[in-house]
Amino acid sequence: MSAALDFAVPLFVPGDRPERFAKAAAAGADAVIVDLEDAVAAQAKPAARAALRSDFGAGPVLVRVNAIGTPWHEADMAALAGRGFAAVMVPKAEASEAFAALCAKAALPVIALVESARGLAEARRIAGLPHLARLAFGSIDFCADLGCAHSREALLAARSELVLASRLAGLAAPIDGVTTAIDDGDQIAEDARHARDLGFGGKLCIHPRQIEAIRAGFAPDEAEILWARKVLASGDGAAAVDGAMVDEPVRIRARAILRRAEPAAGP
């Protein structure tokens, strides 16, 4: 997968608000997702499609199209050609013949937004489709489909399956769903840390005020960095660090922590 798609903090911007595109790109997110789906009312979708562009920032720009089977999907996909987008995000992703055909002929990498019980059940098949670059979790729609609470406990199994499906297919770690709170930085950071601890590699962002909290949640804290440095200083083979056994699998985790902490953690 292209390094441009290995982002942790992608920010949605409504596709019918082109005056916000450059502001979104300058807000500090790793990528911008121009949204043609949920953020745009039905009557505004043609105007949003006509306003599509990717030349407003230095980072990757993606587009979330409307789902397969909706009246807008085919026109959305046709509008992406030659516009310089990094990827297309397809909502309501399931391992249907239509979605498989979309992936097979896609001119752009595809990010599958899993938002239903069927999508979750078919996540491993979805992850193995051609041109499939990454999985993402549409947690709010998923809860609506199942009638469950939007809580960590209720979504633990779903999140774990997306991480496992991504790993089995050799994809980058999946992107977690949104936190609806905009101003509660502590909750946003805690949600991001929970996703990180489960194996997610990023979290969807719906407002610029969420960016720094999400980034903080995915970053190692000082205690983790100190632990990782101690582990890597313990030499090769089995050793004890702070009363716990350390061997190569533990050192692999320590190296990953320091990579996430760069440049603060140093070499």
Image: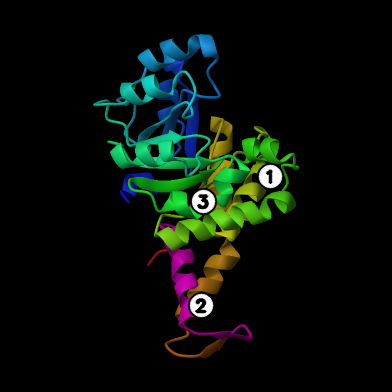
Amino acid, disc 1: Asp
Q: Which residue is mark 1?
A: 186
- As helix, strand or loop, the secondary structure at mark 2 comes to helix
Q: Which residue is mark 2?
A: 250
- Assess disc 3: are there few (<14), some (14-19) or many (≥20) residues with their C-alpha within 10 Å of its C-alpha: many
**Which quarter of the image is occupied by the C terminus?**
bottom left
Residue 130 seen in render: yes
Amino acid, disc 3: Ala
C-alpha separation, residue under disc 3 versus residue under disc 2? 29 Å
Measured from the top left, where is residue 207 in percent x and y?
A: 56, 30
- Farthest residue, direction left: 82
| Above or below, comparing residue 102 to residue 39 in the picture | below
Q: Are marks 1 and 2 in contact (CB under 8 Å)?
A: no
Q: Which residue is mark 3?
A: 123
Residue 80 vs residue 121, the one in the foreground: 121
C-alpha separation, residue under disc 1 versus residue under disc 3? 31 Å
Q: Residue at x 51, y 44 (%)?
A: 136
Read off the magenta span. 241-264
Measured from the top left, where is residue 230 in percent x and y?
A: 51, 78
Residue 186 located left or right of residue 138: right
| Above or below, comparing residue 147 to residue 36 in the picture | below
